[in-house]
Structures are given as structure tokens and as C-alpha cells.
Image (tube, helix red, strand yellow):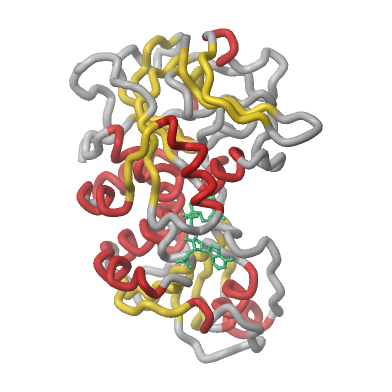
Amino acid sequence: MTRGWQITLGEGDPVVALVDLDDAALRPASDAPDATADVAVDVTWSGLNYKDALAFAGNRGVVRSSPLVPGIDVVGTVASSTTPRWAPGDRVLLNGAGAGETRHGGLAERAHLDGGTLVATPRAFTDQQAAGIGTAGFTAMLAVLALERHGVTHGDVLVTGASGGLGAFAIALLARAGFTVTAATGRPEQADRLQHLGATVVLDRVELDRPSRALESQHWVGVIDAVGGPLLATALAQVRQNGVAVACGNAASAALATTVMPFILRGVSLVGVNSSLTARTLREQAWQRLARDLDPAVVDAIARPIALDEARDAAAEVLAGRVAGRLAVRVGEPASAAPATGGVSA
Ligand SMILES: NC(=O)c1ccc[n+]([C@@H]2O[C@H](COP(=O)([O-])OP(=O)(O)OC[C@H]3O[C@@H](n4cnc5c(N)ncnc54)[C@H](OP(=O)(O)O)[C@@H]3O)[C@@H](O)[C@H]2O)c1
């Protein structure tokens, strides 16, 4: 039997329970959109992302299959594989690709996954650190890569939702890449922590969370936005000529009321990131870059470990905006003390 969280949707409130599941219940249904499950993983660590917190609350936009094991991040060791790409003992991780949404995710001791979506866990990180980075750090890396792909390589970058998981990793990665980082936060008491991560300026988010003019003074060569709504609209009005804003999240709002002026007069680009649907080559590129650029000590400073049975209470804290940084969830013990194999060296 496998210990794990299960969310069941019905007519009334969702039923959320930590239960013992048998292996058959952990496999995707044969008629699921992606029923590929050629790799069985002994899960060691997962995470508690904003999306996972929504799943615990029974959000039907996230819980798209019921009953469901939540957890969009999976970190562990291959137990068995029917694809030659992976062998028992390989350290692997997964961010998204339907896990914890349309198929069972990482908050159970065993996961049956599509080997084509897995990435080798970089040797630079322990399993706990890989889960600490999780979707938040992976998405922040994708956002930095998007800026670079659009020719933004130096200058002032604004990060919104700065004290959240995505924001914290974005600050660290941007500072490491040589950008000057302004962190916008609703929690000014986090200023020291954000500066320690690499922010040069910490801005109270009320300065951006307001109606904006079509064009305002130009400040940013780039924006990494986790919140949407008026903050993103104001940030767009402040992007410099040919600058780029990367929309990653909607922690404040999914709405965006803006004008075409930043785009047609300043050549600004608005780029989106969907980490869940990222192609494997870009997943691997992002994790190789994380292994190269992210000091494991920074991960330990951003991510705090919690136990599997604490996940439901922690989810409520995430939704209430009372968690700074990331939560990594300890799910199971490593199957063996075998040395890392198949990892990306860094
Ligand atoms: N596109 C993707 O692939 C992808 C991947 C991961 C996450 N996301 C999304 O990105 C967002 C952030 O994720 P996360 O994991 O970093 O979540 P998180 O740790 O909960 O952080 C969210 C941050 O947003 C800010 N915030 C919350 N409510 C706000 C409000 N009403 N107005 C303005 N700011 C607010 C807070 O930062 P301050 O207290 O510092 O202001 C909070 O710490 C979520 O919407 C998530 O779903 C998207």
C-alpha cells in the first residue's frame, strides 16, 4: 500500500484525506487523455505550490480528474521502467505535465508517470532541494530564459509577487545573471530577505497596484510577473523601449486591463510561460541552467521542509498568503542509498 493524499470531488465540499492507496488506484485510467505510465517512481519529495493549495481547496480548474492525488511536483527514484530512457535507481523529477491535475501527482509515495516528461535530477541538488525548487523555480528559470531569448540580457528587471516561491527564485536567478532587480511585495517586512536573495530595490506593491496611465516613465527592461491584474498593467506601462514582460501567474487576478500603447509605441513584448506544457528539451535546458546558476544554499534559504501529513493545513496557509518562499513536502524515504545516476552534472 502507498500512503498519499486523495481529493475526491462530488456535489458538496471536496473530500480530502490522507489514505492508503493500492497500486492499481495510482495508475492513470486507461481512457485518460494521457494514459502513458511507463515509469514507476518511489517519490521522496514533492512541493506545495499555489496550484496544489487550490487543489486541496477542491478547485475544479486544477482537480480535473477525481479522485486525484495532488502534487504538481514529483521528485524520487525510478522503481521500474518499461522505457529504455530510464532504469531502476535513476533520480528523476517532474514539474507539471498534468501531474496533480489530470493524473495522480507527487503527494503519494508511488507515482506512475510518462517517462517522456521526466528530467534527470541534477547532481547539484538533493531530492529535497529539487523539490524545494519545484515548479516555482523551474518557472522562474523559464521566465529568465524567455527574457534572454528576446534579447534582454542586462538592466533593471521588476519581479512581482516577490516574496512568493516564483518571485524568490526569479530574484535569485536574475541577480545571478547580472540584472538589477526590483522586488515588488505586499510584505515590506520581507525586505531584508529579498535583498539577501539579490534584490537591489524593494518596492511596496501599492505603488503598482493602482489604475495606470497608458504610458508612464520607463523603468524596466524586463518584468517577471506572478500576480496579473493592475500590477501587471502598471508594469507594462513602465517597460522601456523594446523591453519584455513575462506573464507567469495570476495570484492577484486573471484580468488584465491595458492599452496597446506600450506595444505599438515602445515595441514592448508580453510573453507567456506555461511550465506544465513545456517541451522536454526546454525542461532539460532549464534544469541544467538551474544546476549551473542556483546555489543550493539559496534553495535552502527559500524552501522549508514539511511532513506529508502537514500538507493540508499548509495549503490553507498558502491560500491565505501567509507563506513566504516555498514549502517542500517530505513524502517517502529513498528506496536505497544508491549513488545518483543519470543526473545532469553541474
Ligand atoms: N505559468 C506557470 O507555469 C506557473 C508556474 C508556477 C506558478 N504559477 C502561478 O504564479 C503565481 C505565483 O506562484 P507561487 O508558487 O510563487 O505562489 P506563492 O508562493 O503563493 O506566491 C504568490 C505571491 O503573490 C503575491 N500576491 C498574493 N496575493 C496577491 C494579491 N492579491 N495582490 C498582489 N500580489 C499578491 C504575494 O507576494 P508578495 O506578498 O511578495 O506581494 C505572494 O507571495 C500563482 O498564480 C501560480 O499559479 C504559474
Q: Residue at x 41, y 18 (%)?
A: 41
Compared across the picture, whether 34 is left or right of 148 comes to right
Quadrant assignment, res 175: bottom left
Which part of the image, by quadrant, shows the C terminus? top left
Compared across the picture, whether 203 is left or right of 266 comes to left
What residue occupies the far right of the structure in this picture? 11
Look at the picture and state if 260 lies above or below 278: below
Depth order, front residue of 307/62:
307
Q: Residue at x 57, y 70 (%)?
A: 269
Compared across the picture, whether 73 is left or right of 200 comes to right
Point out residue 296 in the picture as x, y percentages from the top left corner. 22, 47
Q: Is residue 293 visible?
A: no
Point out residue 108 in the picture as x, y percentages from the top left corner. 47, 23
Look at the picture and state if 308 lies above or below 245: above
Depth order, front residue of 53/85:
53
What residue occupies the far bottom of the structure in this picture? 217
Q: Residue at x 28, y 71 (%)?
A: 192
Look at the picture and state if 317 lies above or below 162: above
Point out residue 276 in the picture as x, y percentages from the top left corner. 55, 41
Q: Residue at x 47, y 29 (%)?
A: 106
Depth order, front residue of 145/172:
172
Point out residue 172 in the picture as x, y percentages from the top left corner. 31, 61
Q: How many circles with numbers are drawn on the protein?
A: 0
Compared across the picture, whether 256 is left or right of 220 comes to right
Q: Is residue 113 visible?
A: yes
Quadrant assignment, res 261: bottom right
Look at the picture and state if 51 lies above or below 87: below
